[in-house]
Image (tube, coloured by chain):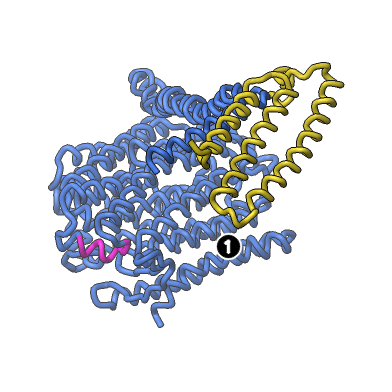
Chain colours: A blue, B yellow
């Protein structure tokens, strides 16, 4: 019986998508609320079943459920199955995806209220959730890749949800194309793996990697290819440019897709194929290095952004870098634990930003300020999430970040120092956002993202938006405690379970957590000094470090580099011009050449058609004589 | 020296060659028609000679020769009619000037 549950979990949001797009939207468009209810119902049920599955997995031998496959395609001897696998990693991801999705869907009822695309919004959100659930449960590479592209498609559709705005349409295209670069590496890795091993099954591939059949350069290249896919999806350097622009989508979309789930799919992918990475020193090192570098690289840009969603976007990239660093330096459990905690507090931060926008109508922090009094719930929850992401004991971010720092300290000191500096930066930019948004006096505001408000009265968001914030705030505090006893590590891999109090307070007897706490505290203090108490002038500091300020605020000129140099010079002037030349001269030349050659041959041959019958007769006579001579000589 | 089959065949071949040369080389359409008649008659000689020397009992070859004469007569009539028609329209019987079938 239990093996039906994963299928139901996957199919519920899919049916919700089908019902909304084929029944509600065409026939019941005048009752927009129905779409929201159907989605929330489906995802709520999926969430409850996910908890059931978690319990099943906890008690199953080896933390893995056996689910029979269904045959999908038979090509010659190759049989491709569709099947789901539910192991510890999947169970954790199911919980993350369904909880965040459920809270975001409930929140969206308030946020998207009155939007003409309400049904479309919920249809895409359902489809996204279905694809994401399929992605985490898929047991073979073909099926996994299908959903991998599916979430990319939904991301594209939802970033460009307000497609009438050119910025949104462009951002959607940018996100799709940039992630596609990484997906190319992933696809190449899948095909190469199949060529070498003849199987798509993830379990079998794990077996081959562990048994040592799959080794050496093959394994390294496959791991690098898979990691390329993860770099694209998780917006790691150098494919990070799409995520800040993706903030053009509705804010709940950013919370669900571009903070908690889809961008974490890259981290999940590396974790899913961890046995392959484990056996290749080079692949594992590159995961750690790219992750560690991205963490600090994105954090520097987060320091200077004025758009609250962009601060959060760079923060997401930076935290995803932490997860990669955790995977590369420490293993599955550490990376996934940070993913688990990050999903809740980052979704909360985005929903909080959305709530602020709902009231002020802007994302520009320079036009906010003083919202602490008008929006106490939003302020309190945002503050909790900020403390959590900054890594303040005993909130959830502290526990996972500490594990990452410890493992990188043991593994790679340079990355450890980078990560430590990032801790300081994270605390600084988050509290810069908190003080600019909620502290001081109100500075104006602007027209709303979705135009449902005219005159702006600062107000707390409706209950339907506040309750998800509170739920996520609770999770931001407590989700980290799951691993205080080492239970999470034990569940996902190996580790010893110790008592709660020993873990909870014992961690403060080590020096490393204190260093990171002091760094985070000084980051918060600096933000307070600059943006709340005004002991230091932000402008003066900006001037003093103006080269750095320019570098960070122009995002290291990566957009310009990609657009002007790579797209403009290499692609348009180089590759495309070359292909165009080949097409107009080579391909067209061949086609026209055949035609011209035939015509020229015709012109030459028609000279023989003189119209002189005697010439024709002569030819016949000569031919006959020739035949006769041939008979005489050879016959 | 007695006259045998080969003499008739040589005569036939010589006549055929003369006719072929004329048909290919002459420019006057009437002469070409006459040359074709010579070729047909060369064939008739060969047919009759074979009939006489190879299968004297059967008259097949001789009957065939008579058929050829009939066809030749009809062909001459049609040929001359065509030549007259061409002459009326183009005022010439020079075949090199009849190049309407040219590309």
Which region of the structure is painted magenta?
A: A200-208
At which x and y percent is residue A242?
44, 38
On screen, residue A591 above or below A219: above
Q: Is residue A250 left or right of residue B79?
A: left
From this viewpoint, which residue is outermost toward the front?
B1
At which x and y percent is residue A619?
57, 29
On screen, residue A240 above or below A222: above
Foreground residue, A355 or B74? B74
Mark 1 lies on a secondary structure that is helix
- Is residue A484 visible to us here? no
The residue where tag 1 is placed is: A17
Q: Residues within 10 Å of mark 1 (few under 14, many from 20)?
A: many
- Is residue B67 visible to us here? yes
Q: Is residue A566 left or right of residue A221?
A: right
At which x and y percent is residue A55?
34, 75
Q: Chain of mark 1?
A: A
Residue at 29 percent across and 74 percent down: it is A58
Foreground residue, A321 or A103? A321
At which x and y percent is residue B16?
60, 32
Count of numbered badges drawn on the protein: 1
On screen, residue A634 above or below A268: above
- Looking at the rendering, in which quadrant would you find the N terminus of chain A? bottom left
Foreground residue, A161 or A518? A161
The rendered magenta stretch, by its main secondary structure, is classed as helix
Residue at 35 percent across and 47 percent down: it is A229
Residue at 34 percent across and 61 percent down: it is A479
Q: Is residue A119 left or right of residue A310?
A: right
């Amino acid at each position: 019986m239990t093996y039906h549950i994963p299928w139901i979990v996957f199919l519920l949001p899919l049916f919700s998508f089908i019902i909304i797009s084929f029944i509600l939207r065409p026939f019941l468009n005048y009752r927009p609320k129905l779409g929201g209810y159907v989605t929330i119902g489906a995802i709520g049920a999926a969430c409850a079943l996910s908890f059931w599955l978690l319990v099943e997995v906890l008690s199953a031998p080896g933390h893995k459920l056996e689910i029979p496959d269904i045959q999908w395609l038979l090509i010659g001897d190759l049989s491709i199955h569709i099947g789901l696998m539910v192991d510890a990693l999947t169970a954790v991801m199911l919980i993350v995806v369904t909880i965040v999705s459920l809270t975001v869907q409930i929140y969206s009822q308030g946020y998207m209220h009155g939007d003409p695309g309400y049904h479309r919004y919920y249809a895409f959100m359902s489809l996204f959730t279905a694809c994401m659930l399929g992605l985490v449960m898929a047991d073979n590479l073909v099926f996994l890749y299908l959903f991998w592209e599916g979430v990319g498609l939904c991301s594209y559709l939802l970033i460009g949800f307000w497609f009438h705005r050119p910025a949104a349409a462009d951002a959607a295209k940018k996100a799709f194309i940039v992630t596609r670069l990484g997906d190319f590496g992933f696809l190449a890795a899948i095909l190469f793996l199949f060529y070498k091993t003849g199987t798509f099954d993830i379990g079998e591939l794990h077996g081959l990697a562990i048994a040592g059949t799959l080794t050496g350069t093959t394994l390294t290249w496959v791991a690098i290819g898979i990691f390329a896919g993860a770099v694209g999806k998780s917006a790691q350097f150098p494919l990070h440019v799409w995520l800040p622009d993706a903030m053009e989508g509705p804010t709940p979309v950013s919370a669900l897709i571009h903070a908690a789930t889809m961008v974490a799919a890259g981290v999940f992918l590396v974790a899913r194929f961890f046995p392959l990475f484990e056996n290749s020193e080079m692949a594992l090192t590159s995961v750690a290095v790219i992750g560690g570098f991205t963490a600090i690289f994105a954090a520097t840009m987060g320091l200077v952004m004025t758009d609250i969603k962009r601060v959060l976007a760079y923060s997401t990239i930076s935290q995803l870098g932490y997860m990669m660093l955790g995977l590369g330096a420490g293993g599955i459990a550490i990376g996934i634990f940070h993913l688990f905690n990050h999903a809740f507090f980052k979704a909360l931060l985005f929903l909080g930003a959305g709530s602020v926008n709902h009231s002020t109508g802007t994302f520009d922090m320079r036009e906010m300020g003083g919202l602490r009094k008008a929006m106490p719930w939003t302020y309190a929850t945002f503050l909790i999430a900020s403390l959590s992401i900054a890594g303040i004991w005993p909130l959830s971010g502290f526990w996972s970040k500490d594990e990452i720092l410890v493992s990188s300290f043991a593994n790679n000191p340079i990355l450890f120092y980078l990560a430590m500096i990032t801790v300081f930066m994270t605390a600084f930019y988050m509290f810069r956002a908190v003080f600019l948004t909620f502290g001081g006096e109100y500075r104006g505001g602007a027209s709303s993202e979705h135009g449902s408000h005219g005159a702006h009265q600062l107000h707390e968001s409706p209950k339907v938006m506040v309750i998800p914030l509170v739920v996520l705030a609770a999770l931001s505090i407590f989700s980290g405690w799951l691993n205080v006893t080492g239970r999470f590590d034990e569940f996902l891999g190996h580790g010893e379970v110790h008592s709660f109090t020993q873990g909870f307070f014992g961690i403060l007897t080590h020096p490393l957590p204190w260093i990171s706490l002091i760094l985070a505290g000084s980051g918060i203090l600096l933000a307070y000094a600059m943006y709340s108490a005004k002991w230091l002038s932000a402008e003066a500091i900006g001037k003093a470090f103006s080269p750095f300020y320019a570098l960070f605020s122009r995002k290291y000129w990566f957009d310009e580099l990609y657009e002007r140099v790579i797209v403009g010079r290499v692609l348009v002037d180089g590759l495309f011009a070359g292909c165009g030349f080949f097409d107009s001269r080579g391909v067209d030349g061949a086609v026209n050449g055949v035609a011209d050659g035939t015509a020229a041959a015709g012109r030459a041959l028609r000279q023989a058609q003189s119209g002189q019958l005697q010439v024709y007769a002569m030819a016949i006579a000569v031919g006959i004589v020739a035949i006769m001579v041939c008979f005489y000589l050879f016959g | 020296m007695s006259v045998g089959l080969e003499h008739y065949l040589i005569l036939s071949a010589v006549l055929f060659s003369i006719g072929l040369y004329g048909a290919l080389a002459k420019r006057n359409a009437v002469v070409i028609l006459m040359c074709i008649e010579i070729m047909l008659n060369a064939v008739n000689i060969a047919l009759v000679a074979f009939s006489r020397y190879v299968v004297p009992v059967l008259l097949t070859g001789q009957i065939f020769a008579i058929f050829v004469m009939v066809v030749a007569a009809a062909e001459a009539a049609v040929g001359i009619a065509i030549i007259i028609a061409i002459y009326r329209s183009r005022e010439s019987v020079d075949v090199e000037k009849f190049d309407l079938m040219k590309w």
